[in-house]
Image: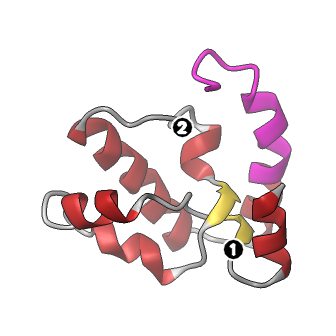
Amino acid sequence: LPQLFNVLRGEMSLVGPRPHAIEHNDWYRGRIPRYMLRHKVRPGITGWAQVNGLRGITDSEDKMALRVEHDLWYIQNWSLWLDLRILLMTPLSMFHRNAF
């Protein structure tokens, strides 16, 4: 619920790359190529990576790289229709084996 207030204040979007902890930004910026490009758009409550099963704790650099790859794909292919698709997929993805 607090993130909805961030959306109303214009600090976040409903759809976009999920925000990462500052420590993750500092750690991964030097390890994953193009990591910081995900900051070119507002962070979102849900995103392309999340509806594709990449959510929750990221316990390896490979998993984070895959999440970033999905985030960058979303940014490069953004459209209103893609956002609507992600919003429709989000409740369904909660029943996926990687839901949490």
| Comes first in the chain, label 1 or label 2 | 1
Q: Mark 1, residues whose alpha carbon is within 10 Å: few (<14), some, or many (≥20)?
A: many
Task: From the top left corner, tell me how far across and down residue 73 is, in percent.
Answer: 47, 61
**Image quarter of residue 96:** top right
Q: Residues within 10 Å of mark 2 (few under 14, many from 20)?
A: some
Spot occupied by residue 67 in the image (x, y as percentages of width and height): 41, 47
Give left or right: position of 21 versus 92: left
Q: For the residues labelled 1 and 2, say whether their Cβ atoms are less than 8 Å apart.
A: no
Residue under the point 45% across and 58% down: 20
Which of the 4 image quadrants contains residue 61?
A: top left
Q: Residue furthest left?
A: 30
Magenta-span inclusion, residue 98: yes
Which element type, helix, strand or loop, lies under badge 2? loop
**Which residue occupies the foreground of this view, 5 or 97?**
5
Q: CA distance from mark 1 to mark 2?
A: 18 Å
Task: Identify the secondary structure beneath mark 1.
Answer: loop
Looking at the image, is 87 positioned above or below residue 53?
A: below
**Where does label 1 land, which residue?**
12
Q: Residue at x 19, y 64 (%)?
A: 33
Q: Residue at x 63, y 71 (%)?
A: 78
Q: Amino acid at mark 2?
A: Arg
- Residue located beneath label 2 in the image: 55
- Count of number-bearing discs: 2
Q: Which region is colored magenta?
A: 86-100
Q: Position of residue 71 (x, y in %)?
A: 48, 59
Compared across the picture, whether 11 is left or right of 21 comes to right
**Amino acid type assigned to the residue bearing label 1 in the image:** Met
Q: Which residue is rendered at x = 52% and y = 35% of the image?
A: 56
Q: Quadrant of residue 36?
A: bottom left
